[in-house]
Image (tube, rainbow, N blue to C red):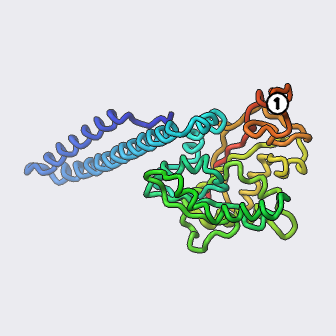
Amino acid sequence: MLKSKYSLAGASAALALVLGGCTALDNYAGADDATSEEVETVVVEETTVTETVEEVVQDVVDEVAEVTAEAKLAAILEAQPDEVKARYGARNPAETLAFFGIEPGMKVAEALPGGGWYSKILLPYLGEEGALVGAHYPDALWSLFGFGDEWAATRVEGTANWPNQAAEWGIEGSAKVKSFQLTKMPEEASGKLDAVLFIRALHNLNRFSAGDTDYMGDTLAETYRVLKPGGIVGVVQHRAPDENSDAWADGSNGYLKEAAVIAAFEAAGFELADSSDLNANPADVPTEEEFVWRLPPVLVGTEEDTPERAAYEAVGESNRMTLKFRKPA
């Protein structure tokens, strides 16, 4: 629960008190018998009080917006189906979006929106004044997974069709929807976005960056370009143990080292604004013979009703870094 500087009642009372003080000063300053020195003093005092009124009014406005946004997000989360709610304990959507500073009316890009787990929360939360950009892998990357041409072609088609897919969800009061590729966003998008979210979306960009093909670097450069000055990047990513080798933690096993992620963003011009352990799970300590997909919800490599499956279920979802970067203003 976000805490505000004032309660609404307290802020309103303060506003009434200050406004009342202004009226009294106005009457005093208009008195016929005031000396020039007294008038000057009153003007100074009135200016001070006027500034205080503006500050209190802004506090009230900010608090109303904060409470309204918090209540709106809570209602959206409550309305999600049970299979989505089942992952709140691991994904912490309310806390994560609050940490990144995502608010209604923003223009936000979400990397790899896929089937819409986060998108179906963001679309109504950003609202009709906001916009959500589905930011997808470049078409050429899909073939690198090695699952065949037909599989890759289906993913490329899905990228192009994502706005239609989002429209089919029929979310009332939804944000405007667009679809870009991460490594080549439109020129007209320069400096337009408030935030870009990479939620478990960086590992394959890093994994397939080699030689002259730098999907990770190109993505971060484009992200920097399309953000407004002061814009935010929110990262939630499977976190590799520091003691594991860099070769193992290149993304091919789903994990990246936190220091490597920070270094990549700083090299692209971003500043690390904050970090959090709100999505951490210290029980996830993978060996170099394991990958992230051994864990829930995927549970690859183990059979139901086996001790191995039960052990991974007991670990829970992956240990995740949560990082907030800022494009310098």
Q: Residue 141 in the image: x percent, y percent?
A: 78, 64
- Disc 1 marks a residue whose amino acid type is Arg
Residue labelled with disc 1:
309
Q: Is mark 1 on a helix, strand or loop?
A: helix
Residue in the picture at 67% in, 38% down:
279
In this view, which residue lies farthest toward the left?
Answer: 32
Residue 10 falls in image quadrant:
top left
Q: Where is residue 97 in the image (x, y as percent from the top left)?
A: 57, 45
Compared across the picture, whether 9 is left or right of 309 comes to left
165, 189: nearer the viewer: 165
Q: In this view, does 104 lie to the left or right of 28?
A: right
Residue sitting at the far bottom: 187
Quadrant of res 142: bottom right
Crowdedness near tag 1: few (<14), some (14–19) or many (≥20) residues, C-alpha within 10 Å: some
Confirm whether residue 73 shows in the render.
yes
Observer able to see residue 229: no
Q: Residue furthest front?
A: 150
